[in-house]
Image (cartoon, grey):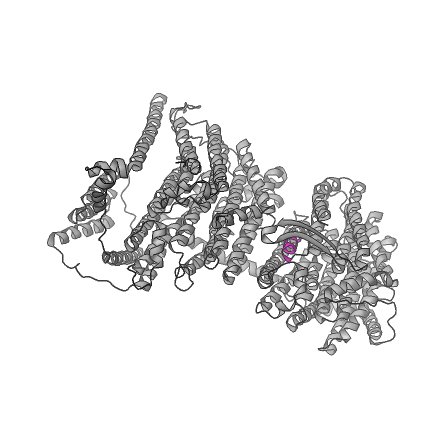
Amino acid sequence: MTTLILATLALAPLAAWLGGRSAKVATLLALWPLGLTVWFASALRILLQGGVVTDHVAWIPSLGLNLSFRLDGLSAVFALMITGIGTLIVVYGAHYLDGHPERGRFQASLFAFMAAMLGVVLTDNLFTLFVFWELTGFTSFLLIGFDHEKESSRRAATQALIVTGAGGLALLAAAVLISQVTGTLTIPELLSDRGLLTNHASYLPIVVLVLLAAFTKSAQFPFHFWLPGAMAAPTPVSAYLHSATMVKAGVYLVARLTPVLGGTLLWELPLVIIGGLTMLGGAYRAVQETDLKRVLAYSTVSALGTLFLLLGLGSEAAFTAAIVYLVAHACYKGALFQVAGVVDHATGTRDIRRLAGLRALLPQTSLAGLLAAASMVGLPLTIGFVAKELVYEAGLKYALSPFALVPAVVVGSALLGVCGLLAGFGPFFTPGAPPEGSHRASAGLWFGPLTLAVLGLLFGSAPGLTSGVFSLAASAVAGRSVEAHLALWHGLGLPLGLSALTLLLVALLYRARKLVRARAWPRSLGFERGFTGFLRIMDFISGRIGPPLQESSLASYALTFVLSAGTLVGVGYYLTAERVSLDGLLDVRAYELAISGLIILGAIGAVRARTTMTAVLCLGTSGYGVALTFLLFGAPDLAMTQFAAETLTAVIFVFVFWQFPRVDQASARLVKLRDAIIACGCGVLVTLLALDSATLPTTRRLSDFYAEAAPSLAHGRNIVNVILVDFRAFDTLGEITVLVTAAVGVVALLRIAAAERQGG
Amino acid sequence: MNLLFPLSPLLVTGFGALLLMLTEAFGTPRVRAAAGEEVVDAGAGRSGELALGAAVVLLAGAVLSVAVWLAGPAASPELKLLEPWLVFDGVALFMSFVLCLGGAFTALLAGGYLPEHQIDRGEFFPLLILATLGAQVLSASGDLLMLFVGLETMSLAVYAMIGLRRGSARAVEAALKYFLLGSFAAALMLFGGALLYGATGHTDLRGIGQAVASIGQPESTVNAGLVLLGLTLNLVGLAFKVSAVPFHMWTPDAYEGAPTPTTTFMAVAVKTAAFAILMRLLLTSFGDERAMSWGAGWPPVLALLAIVTMTVANLIAGRQESVKRMLAYSSIAHAGYVLIGLVATMRSPIEGQASVMVYLLTYTVSTAGAFGALILCGSRGAEAVSYDDLAGIGRRHPAAALVFTLFLLSLAGMPPTAGFFGKLYIFRAAIDSELYWLTVLGLLNSLVAAYYYLRVIVSMYFREPAPGAPVATPMRSGLVTGALVLAAFLVLAIGLAPATPLAMALGSLTGG
């Protein structure tokens, strides 16, 4: 499996090349996903015999990261959807984008996405799952933003990326927490000790993070807004990513982790509530829309809500229903999206108020639309019917409150049924003339939707065909063996009655569709606006923070620096200040006071000076004062160095500042005051520090060491000599090296000067 | 006494710098100064050759660092003789490798950049190697005085490298700002070192550590207050060098005003060396239980610095119009992530240090690559600096855009690049140390950061230059291309086989 996934990724460049050719050549690309479908289908045999297909490649052993893949019932259902529908989409996309200058890029991104998506559903390691999860986000960014000339596509792509990317981070955080608790990230090992997590203190954050990741990826309330926005993508992308694959990654995550994290109210209740809200809200918004693709987008949001709701119910019946519903939805929604694309392609519009009477023009497409709509409405013999019966059954068995749940599900289903009719029935069978300029569709366009729609009919009419696989998948979700009972006829019972009621509601609502559209209120809850508002606020905040923090004037930098450092040191001093002792410090002689006065006067003069030259001279006075102090307290060498440095500095300053202007740009009074306060604060702090260090014992004298060690260690009496050639021989060597190096530099400078003279 | 081999990473850079300087002093300039132009030095017109020479020297340093590392401490017991002044242990060798690598990238980039932008001057390369040498010494120093010598060797060379373009007011302004504030920071560090010496009687880090550890015991004579102040002052000085907020003010100006190869060096090597010595200082001298506790030690201060640094830098970075400036802020933000790793040493010292080391490596290759790609995207007289300059590069120069994208993804921490694993290790270490809030803030910050990195990608691929606007054309330079290929290879190699650097970092710490 590792090879298959990596090969799919590696084929992306080939796809770019072939996809850029004519539609016929590009169709050949479908052979690869078709082969994958056959491979996964044949692997089903092993699964049905009770086996599991695994593949293990060591990646980063020290971190416990391996590329290990595992195919069980749940993964197989997803993998077959990804590769099967992928095959149809490659064909469909080749014809839909025929003549588009960048159709090669589309096929390449599609292959990369397919590889990432397969990785998500096949890996058995949470961390690798996260990596592939983010890759699907990134490749879908490229696909949604395919028409990158349009501002709206770019915005939609970025929005989808930010929302799902944030969810991915939540998944990473959850994975880290899980590995902290259990010490492992492989899903089979997690399954083996499931009580550990549910009883741990980190259970709550883990559940919140996992659900956050799933809800953002699968467009659940209140993160649902990115999915309708993502309809800016070309229709093949919507049909693939936004009906069958990427948006179902969140569902996959929750289903995969249900045996590990599930079985508690904390896990199930949010799923039921958010799923239920999204189911109703999405369906309600869907019937108000007039754009074909937006109708389908909102109905997808609603269907995803239903799936989460079912997973949250937690019963075996509900898990079975979820799996069947998942497949049913992929079949009819994938078909309907493609139908919408064909209609758009043929007529140039997606406005359902203008679309009518297309049956004669697009006979095959209308058949596909009809079959898919029948499945979505839930007519018998379709897989949609089977799924709906199972959903009602699961709802009726819900222990907590079937009375609130069942009506909600019925209303949701009815509204979704209306959407099905709006998309698959209305454009073809509403009496009226097709929009002007409509043309026929090529076989490559109607092949995909028709295949999917017929598959839906096949699965629905012969449920025995699929029940084995569905049982396996439901067992994987439940964590124990589940037998799925799929049947054409569930017998007379409440579910059948509810189905009939649903059909009646669908018929009534569809007849009154214009009224529903016109009267519906409220239209939007404004989460998308909230999201853009949030981004704008972030922008605003950073705009406000930025300029004051970045004045680009040296004075303000120095000010910040001094203040920050002063605060840190001041706080440190405050925390540890014990003693400021003036003992022995008050014994001051008159000439010492005079020197101190000289230093202070020099400092004041430097600040108040009008010309740079005066300032430099005043500063020099201060420096000489300090040097005198050194001299008085028995450090003549230090004093000599200080004198030399001060003199040299003053000389250099005089040379450099000779041509500088006067410093009249005196600061404002308030600024001066502020600076004075800060300067005095720093002065006080440094004084305190100096007093503090004066309390230290100063008994260590280096000269004693040399006097003692010179005769005994180096056998020499001349201490200075011994120091230079014995104790500090390397220093001396270093000094010589430095001198030579400096000389080389001087030579270089001289040569430049010579060259300049010649040149000038 | 066999010190030549274990010390070879330092010797190669030291003598390499001198050698280049000699050729600089005694060679003949290839171009003569035209009347009225800037003075031409002996290395003028020879940037390509000098760059190649410098890159060879620095790569040799990197290779030798690894070789000595592989030989292990048992192979060179003589190294103990250099302690405590130079502690050339596994960590120092790892850092030396990273620093030489960063220096080599800079050399290759400069070889293309300097002639392209008419600052074809030879002294850049000896300065670069000297700065790298200073950085190596800094990261390996085990004594406060050695630390200062290393710091100043590195810094003085870098000041000159910033002001290389003497005719440009902005470059001079950048150099002056960095120099003045840098001197101030160095003075603070010196003051802090004096206080530490006064309080403990030691200038070597281990001796200070023993004295600090004795605080609180009845017979201890160490003045705890002075130790704290000494530590604070040293922290301020090093926070300046790693450009942590609020000591970061100089960074954007200096990074923007400097020639881009110098910017690369500052972002990569200067930061790495400063973090290396910060880590050594904290764990050697302040590594006892009390100093590393949350209640009475340095971790909360660093945690606060980390949060402020990441948040402020990321928020401002998103608003920059210049990509170069954005990368400057991004490098500030990355300092914040590294600080998280340092805080994480509090409870898991080995993992924390290893995460910092790996992060610095991944950060070095990604950042050097990103600046290199920016260099590549501009040509004579038209440096690509703003987002608009990069518009449409994706279509016109797919290869340049592709590598740029790779480095940006790595900086953003997207799998499967090197940057992702750098971040992963840091956050894992933080979680091991139960720093959950810090981790969450770090994650949120990387999300914000992804936004502005993506903006560059969007500019390159999804936008077209405004009609009539000057279009940046990538330069042609084998050296720059070579640097980018090497960096891209490393970004992908570390991203696909991240176990090796992690094992090296862990091995450096455990002696394995």
Nearer to me, A39 or B461: A39
Q: Does any portion of residue B140 appear in the rendered image?
A: yes
| Residue that lies at the very extreme toward the left in this rendered image | A590
Question: From the viewer's perspective, is B509 left or right of A245?
Answer: left
Where is residue A109 drawn, in percent x and y? 69, 47
Boundaries of the magenta span: A124-136
Question: From the viewer's perspective, is B23 left or right of A40?
Answer: left
| Res. A406 image quadrant | bottom right
Where is residue A534 drawn, in percent x and y? 56, 61
| Residue that lies at the very extreme toward the top in this rendered image | A758
Q: Quadrant of the N terminus of chain B?
A: top left
Is A128 covered by the magenta stretch?
Answer: yes
Q: Main secondary structure of the magenta part?
A: helix
Q: Does any portion of residue A220 appear in the rendered image?
A: no
Nearer to me, B39 or A700: A700
Is B291 covered by the magenta stretch?
Answer: no
| Res. A306 image quadrant | bottom right
- Classify A403 as above or below A602: below
